[in-house]
Image (tube, helix red, strand yellow):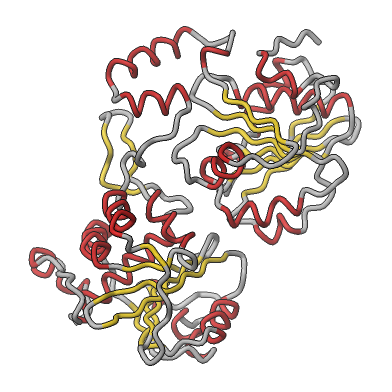
């Protein structure tokens, strides 16, 4: 097999390289470096010369089209291994027992925990992986000399992957910044794109896209300005629970993905976020138990409008099921407009005090919550991206909506134009 390998990726292939069996191999940088192709070839080579059980994963992966399946299938042909590997819909299988499996991290937590015998795990798009996902995944990859390979394009310095593997790399880690200028196979078409971006985009954006540097701020961020101000003001700090003041919870319900719950108190005119909880792949009873196990008294549990819809399977609503589990004071919001809810959150955030420890995961999501980029129009749309940041961000919208509709002492105002055009969408 005549393999042409860029120098940065030699540890993927050369058994004599000191990093060949490093616990972590981490390749990060800008576009055009060939990271995914190199890792795909390296894993196919490893699976050819010895039996491997390889888990290919990313934060969210709901279908085969979300995975690296096509990249691997294409490289099988490039390497001439069609007679060795059998490409099936569920995975790729070698004649020596090698197998490639695909699972998303956030939407397959229980399945990940029970996946045994993994010798190599490839995490693609590592910049989106949460700290909770790492806590679940890393102990699962525990075969002798097992390995975790990560590829990613950096976004922010405090993203879990960047913090874990670039800022403070663990022992036995090979961490390599690799960009287009180290890829001898960098195509002309991408070179022209790179030159265009260099001239047309800001230095910060160009450096992030092509040189793998971190952004100073999340581009297209929905709440980036407000979160940055909260950090500068020192409002993300220890915020203890105040006994004697009821707690409001605001939920975003996940069915095939995560459920997120904020815990808030209003002290005088000051809204405070004292706690946050998120999980997935568990029953509704689990969340009811979390609520009851906390030593809080509750004013209201705020649920989105779909919690009031009856299930065809059970004939009951989520709100009714929670009530039957002993959760009292449930408030189901009417249908709302996302853009109006975002405006309410922007009014709420400058007033919020947030516990920096208990709410860390939720604040990280709010910080990274962003609008979709319209490649055709070359601008950001007004529709946020649906990813792991959506669930805590949606729950925050429901909290802001509830506080505005209740007309309490928190200074949030629902636009009059929205009342006149959509009066049934708000609590009366």
Give the residue drawn at x 71%, y 9%.
4
| Residue 427 position by quadrant | bottom left
Relative to 19, say whether 338 is above or below: below
Percent across and percent down for residue 326 are 51, 92
Q: Is 74 on the left-hand or right-hand side of 403?
A: right
Percent across and percent down for residue 372 are 34, 41
Q: How many marks?
A: 0
Q: Quadrant of the N terminus?
A: top right
Q: Quadrant of the C terminus?
A: bottom left
Q: Nearer the viewer, residue 76 or 362?
A: 362
Relative to 389, say whether 407 is above or below: below
Give the residue drawn at x 48%, y 46%.
158
Q: Is 177 on the left-hand or right-hand side of 414?
A: right
Relative to 148, say whether 229 is above or below: below
Percent across and percent down for residue 344 are 22, 64
Percent across and percent down for residue 162 are 54, 40
Give the residue drawn at x 26%, y 33%.
379
Give the residue drawn at x 84%, y 31%.
94
């Amino acid at each position: 097999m005549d393999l042409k390998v860029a120098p940065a990726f030699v540890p993927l292939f050369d058994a004599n390289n000191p990093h060949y069996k490093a616990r972590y191999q981490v390749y990060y940088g800008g576009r055009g470096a060939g990271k995914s192709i190199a890792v795909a070839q390296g894993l196919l080579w490893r699976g050819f010369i010895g039996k491997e059980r390889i888990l290919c994963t990313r934060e969210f992966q709901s279908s085969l089209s979300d995975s690296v399946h096509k990249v691997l299938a294409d490289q099988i042909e490039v390497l001439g291994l069609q007679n060795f590997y059998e490409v099936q819909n569920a995975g790729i299988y070698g004649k020596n027992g090698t197998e490639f499996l695909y699972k998303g991290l956030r939407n397959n937590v229980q399945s990940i925990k029970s996946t045994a015998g993994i010798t190599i795990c490839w995490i693609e798009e590592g910049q989106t992986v949460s700290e909770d996902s790492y806590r679940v995944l890393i102990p699962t990859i525990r075969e002798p000399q097992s390995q975790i390979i990560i590829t990613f394009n950096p976004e922010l310095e405090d993203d879990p992957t960047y913090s874990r593997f670039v800022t403070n790399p663990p022992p036995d880690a090979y961490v390599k910044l690799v960009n287009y200028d180290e890829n001898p196979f960098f195509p002309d078409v991408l070179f022209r794109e790179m030159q265009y971006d260099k001239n047309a985009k800001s230095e910060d954006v160009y450096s992030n896209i092509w040189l793998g540097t971190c952004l100073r701020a999340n581009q297209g961020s929905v709440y980036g300005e407000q979160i940055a101000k909260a950090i500068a003001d020192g409002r993300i700090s220890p915020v203890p629970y105040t006994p004697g003041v009821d707690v409001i919870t605001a939920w975003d319900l996940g069915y095939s993905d995560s459920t997120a719950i904020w815990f808030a108190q209003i002290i005088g005119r000051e809204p405070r976020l004292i706690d946050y909880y998120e999980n997935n792949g568990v029953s509704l009873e689990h969340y009811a138990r979390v609520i009851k196990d906390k030593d809080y008294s509750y004013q209201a549990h705020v649920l989105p409008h779909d919690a009031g819809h009856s299930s065809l399977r059970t004939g009951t609503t989520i709100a009714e099921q929670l009530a039957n589990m002993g959760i009292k004071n449930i408030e189901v919001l009417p249908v709302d407009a996302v853009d109006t809810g975002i405006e309410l959150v922007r009014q709420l955030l400058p007033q919020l005090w947030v516990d920096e420890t208990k709410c860390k995961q939720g604040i990280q999501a709010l910080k990274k919550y962003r609008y979709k980029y319209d490649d055709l129009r070359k601008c950001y749309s007004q529709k946020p991206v649906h990813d792991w940041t959506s669930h805590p961000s949606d729950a925050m919208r429901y909290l802001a909506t509830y506080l505005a509709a209740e007309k309490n002492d928190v200074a949030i105002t629902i636009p009059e134009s929205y009342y006149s055009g959509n009066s049934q969408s708000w609590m009366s």
